[in-house]
Image (cartoon, coloured by chain):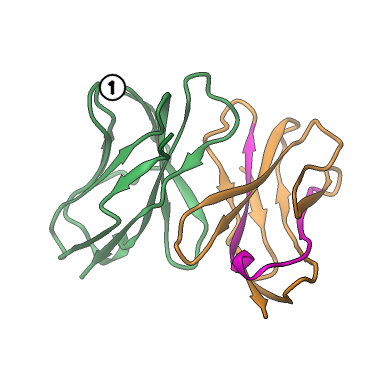
């Protein structure tokens, strides 16, 4: 059973470009979460999605960031007009349909803005 | 709002010895979960151990065990018979029951196991 799959693992963008990070949850999982880890920090919650629905986006920055989890395909975290402060590790996690009480993380995507 | 504090930015231990990592948290919730995650140099987040607050018995997973003191809001991780592969950042995390996806993490403790 494959784990949470994220790609790309590493992404370099110039200031002002767009970054798209993809996440495929574990098989049988229908809940997806995105977290961000800034340098020297722990992970911070960004957004919780189910298929075609955003359930909780209380941790998302108000501008330039968006997330989706379409009916078909992976979840995508999109950052428009990236700035140096967006450089971070972005982790996706998933959990089963019944919610459960543990979420499982992917290996993360490292965004570097130059 | 919940907060998680890890007061030890770095620790080191000799191989085969025992080490304890500290974590305290602050919450007004009565029902919640506590976790320890490991982040090795590969940077993947790996669940080490989980504790339900309503359970008085401390969780154990092989060489990893916790000392959960609910009244003191303390949740320390003990690693016995430390191995070189235990070298990693260790994060303590908290989540209330009902919003179990919204973990609050501490800033981490970098553990180095020396040969």
Q: Colour of chain A?
A: green
Residue B83: x %, y % from top left? 68, 67
- Furthest toward the bottom, the residue is B115
Q: Residue at x 56, y 42 (%)?
A: B103
User: What residue sits right under mark 1 in the picture?
Assistant: A52
Q: Measured along the vertical axis of the image, is residue B105 above or below residue B81? A: above
Chain letter for the orange part: B
Is A42 left or right of A29, judged from the image as shown? Answer: right
Q: Specify the quadrant that holds the C terminus of chain A.
A: bottom left
Q: Residue at x 72, y 57 (%)?
A: B23
Q: Residues within 10 Å of mark 1 (few under 14, many from 20)?
A: few
Q: Is residue A24 magenta?
A: no
Residue B67: x %, y % from top left? 83, 51
Q: Measured along the vertical axis of the image, is residue A103 above or below residue A17? A: above
Question: Could one spot residue B63 in this view of the protein?
Answer: yes
The magenta-colored residue range is: B73-96
Q: Measured along the vertical axis of the image, is residue B25 above or below residue B22? A: above
Q: For the image shown, how many numbered marks are present on the structure?
A: 1
Q: Which chain hosts label 1?
A: A
């Amino acid at each position: 059973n494959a784990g949470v799959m994220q790609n790309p693992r590493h992404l370099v963008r110039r200031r002002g470009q767009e970054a798209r990070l993809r996440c495929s949850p574990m098989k049988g999982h229908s809940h997806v979460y995105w977290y961000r880890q800034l340098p020297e920090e722990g992970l911070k919650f960004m957004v919780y999605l189910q298929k075609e629905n955003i359930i909780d986006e209380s941790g998302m920055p108000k501008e330039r960031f968006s997330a989706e989890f379409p009916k078909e395909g992976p979840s995508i975290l999109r950052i428009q007009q990236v700035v140096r402060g967006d450089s971070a590790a972005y982790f996706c996690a998933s959990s089963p349909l019944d919610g459960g009480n543990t979420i499982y993380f992917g290996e993360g995507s490292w965004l570097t803005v130059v | 709002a919940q907060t998680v504090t890890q007061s030890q930015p770095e620790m080191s231990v000799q191989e085969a010895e025992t080490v304890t990592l500290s974590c305290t948290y602050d919450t007004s919730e009565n029902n919640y979960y506590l976790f320890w995650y490991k982040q090795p140099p590969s940077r993947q987040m790996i669940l080490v151990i989980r504790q339900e607050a309503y359970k008085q018995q401390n969780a154990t997973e092989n060489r990893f065990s916790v000392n959960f003191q609910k009244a003191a809001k303390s949740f320390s991780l003990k690693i016995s018979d430390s191995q070189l592969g235990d070298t990693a950042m260790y994060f303590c995390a908290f989540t209330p029951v009902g919003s179990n996806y919204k973990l609050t993490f501490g800033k981490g403790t970098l553990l180095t196991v020396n040969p």
